[in-house]
Image (spheres, grey):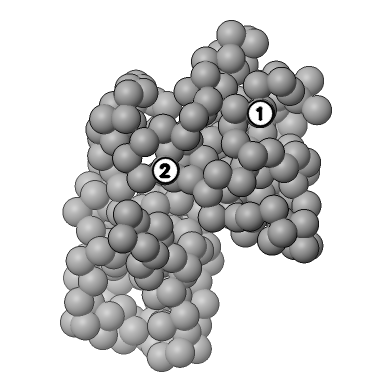
Amino acid sequence: MFERTKYFIIDMDGTFYLGDGLIPGADECVRRIVESGRDYFFFSNNSSHSIETVRARLEKIGFPVPREKVMLSSYVAALTVKRDYPGKTVYLLGNRNLYDVFREMEVPLVQEDADIVMLGFDTDLTYERIRKAAHMLANGAVYMATHPDMNCPTPDGYIPDTGSMIELFAASTGRYPQVLGKPMTPTVDYLTETLSCTRGELAFVGDRMETDIRIGTDHGIPSVLVLSGVTDEKTARESSIRPDLILPSMRELISYL
């Protein structure tokens, strides 16, 4: 199954770790990927994170990684704007981490009359920011979102994520955005361009059918569902999305490497 695979793209929460602990066997699986002559990268849809916050969490649970091993939907979003809308201004709904990525990528950010409204996982969201964004959308601004996840898992349960905010703005403006994170094509393009590889040289590993697995099935890329996170076996079997493998955790992936 993985004869052509060069890079395993691994989700984090529910796949590699859960809460504040490594999922048993996940670290050994990553080491075996490297020993097999392949490589791995972590990819998170969560655009409220920064690379450094992700690295700090991985280090805390005992698996430190260099900066280049962490990929985020926020970079997909910023690079898509730069490529498809060069010089256009952006009104950004996001926290400081997301703002830092757009500034790092030299995307012009404004507070009024933006060409583009970019909706991220805004953990600092206020009604005034919602009002401004809705006004710009009503006036015809291009509309994009970093990722489609409806909820974000936390140690205290799920909290509303960007997908929930997409529905809020749809109710107000009647508009839906171009979505850029998993499972969308811009993320696949970002990975192939960044890693200088073909789609056939990728494989996705994750616990969410609608993002981690669908990105594989929609683009002809091998996908591995692990049942260590949000998806149980019954849900997986009944879904129209069909992963190439369904495994209890990353530990069982070792035998396929």
Type of amino acid under label 1 = Glu
Closer-to-camera residue (121/248)? 248
Q: In which quarter of the image is the C terminus?
A: top right
Closer-to-camera residue (160/169)? 160
Residue at the image point whose x is 58% and y is 14% from the top: 32
Q: Residue 100's spot in the image, x, y percent?
A: 22, 47
Could you tell whether 29 is left or right of 87 in the image?
right
The image quarter in which residue 245 lies: top right
Q: Which mark is residue 18?
A: 2
Type of amino acid under label 2 = Leu
**Mark 1 or 2, nearer chain start:** 2
Could you tell whether 219 is left or right of 167 in the image?
right
Crowding at mark 1 (Cα within 10 Å: few <14, some 14-19, many 20+): some
Q: Quadrant of the N terminus?
A: top right
Q: Residue 102's spot in the image, x, y percent?
A: 29, 50
Q: Is mark 1 on a helix, strand or loop?
A: helix
Residues at discs 1 and 2 in contact (Cβ within 8 Å): no
Residue at the image point whose x is 59% and y is 18% from the top: 33
Q: Is mark 2 on a helix, strand or loop?
A: strand
Q: Mark 1 points at which residue?
A: 252
Closer-to-camera residue (244/94)? 244
Determine the CA span between mark 1 and mark 2: 17 Å
Tell me if I can see residue 256 in this picture: yes
Q: Residue 140's spot in the image, x, y percent?
A: 42, 82
